Amino acid sequence: MNDWVLAIGNKNYSSWSLRAWLAMKHTGVPFREVVIPLYRPESRALILTHSPSGRVPLLRHGATVIWDSLAICEYLAETFPEARLWPGDREARAIARSASAEMHSGFTAMRTNMPMNVRAHRPGVGRTIEAVRDVDRVRTIWTDSLQRFGKGGPFLFGEFSIADAMYAPVVLRFRAYDVQLDARLHEYCSTILKLPALEEWMAAARAEPWTIDAFEYPEIVA
């Protein structure tokens, strides 16, 4: 029996699931994946069989249960220090944690009006004033991180970190909604999109049979 189980939502839509899943894949540890289709009559009951919060993602490691995406990433970083999920430098690590926490708690307008949808291509949709401000803030975080800490590799802090996992769904949003980026940020997005783990996720998302109307036809919130 596998000691590691990760319960996630639809790969086409569940950005929070993707964050934990990418961190999990980066550790290299084998795990069992449980996909629970969201926004269906049976969804909540199925999720509650795994997650006390009624939400995904949920990581089960033996008797330990972690029910929040960033907490899952932190748990993996502590359990697998050799995976280097946080930068080794103290200042870089603090900034990476700040950027990850800001993603975890903020960007509500962008998340609402430009939902993650791997199969979609909607140029210009969802550009409310608040969503555009969120997009601009992401650009600033990425530019600052790459300039200050990205000289050792193609990721925000040189090597792949939790910060990249946290912003990977934003890369997919920018791709779907044709957000314009300068050359350095476009290169960063290309790096994320070429990750074998993300390519695997996207292929699975495209093959899913489920559709969620709220994410296909989002109600724009000004």
Image (cartoon, rainbow, N blue to C red):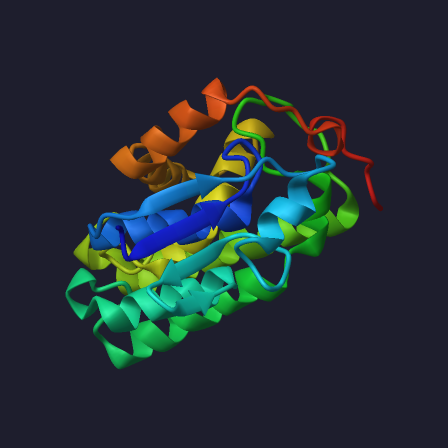
Looking at the image, which residue is at 34% across and 63% down? 61
Residue reaching furthest to the left: 82
Q: Position of residue 48 (x, y in %)?
A: 61, 54
Q: Nearer the viewer, residue 114 or 156?
A: 114
Q: Position of residue 76 (x, y in %)?
A: 31, 65
Q: Nearer the viewer, residue 135 or 96?
A: 96
Q: Above or below — where is 21 with respect to 100?
A: above
Looking at the image, which residue is at 44% across and 42% down? 34
Q: Nearer the viewer, residue 189 or 37?
A: 37
Q: Is residue 203 left or right of residue 14?
A: left
Residue 155 can be seen in this image:
no
Looking at the image, which residue is at 54% across and 35% down? 10
Name which quarter of the figure residue 55 lies in.
bottom right
Q: Position of residue 44 (x, y in %)?
A: 68, 47
Name which quarter of the figure residue 74 lies in.
bottom left
Q: Above or below — where is 33 with respect to 162?
A: above
Q: Is residue 64 left or right of residue 149?
A: right
